[in-house]
Image (cartoon, rainbow, N blue to C red):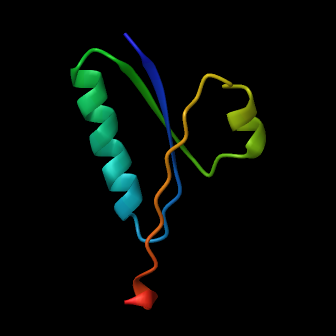
Amino acid sequence: MASVLIVVGSVYGNSSSVAEECAELLRSAGHEAEILSNASLNDLIVRPESVFIGVYIDDRTR
């Protein structure tokens, strides 16, 4: 079983919705999942085993 921290920042709420869905899928597969919004750098430093993946899409460039 893995313990997963999902760090999310959202302006309109879409990213938060995706994070919630991901957490539920992970939990249903038997993993632990925690969502952290508005994280500080200190929140992330204490988890050195973490892998970070981020995506930002600026709709204004289309």
Q: In this view of the protein, which residue sits in the foreground, 60 or 19? A: 60
User: Does residue 37 sit above or below 51 in this rendering?
Assistant: below
Residue 9 image point, x, y percent: 53, 57
Q: In this view, does 44 lie to the left or right of 54?
A: right
Residue at 27% across / 14% down in the picture?
30
On screen, residue 6 versus residue 29, left or right, reads right
Q: Position of residue 57 (x, y in %)?
A: 43, 72
Q: Residue furthest right?
A: 42
Residue 21, located in which quarter of the rendered image?
top left
Q: Which residue is drawn at 70% across and 36% down?
A: 43
Tell me the quadrant of the picture where the N terminus can be found: top left
Q: Which residue is drawn at 46% across and 26% down?
A: 4
Quadrant housing the C terminus: bottom left
The total number of labels drawn is 0
As displayed, is residue 26 above or below residue 44?
above
Task: Give the vertical position of 46 relative to 20 (above or below).
Answer: above
Quadrant of res 12: bottom left
In this view, the residue in front, 15 or 48, is 48
x, y (%) of residue 45? 74, 32
Q: In this view, does 25 lie to the left or right of 57?
A: left
**Residue at image location 68% in from the left, 25% down from the top:** 48
x, y percent for residue 42? 78, 37
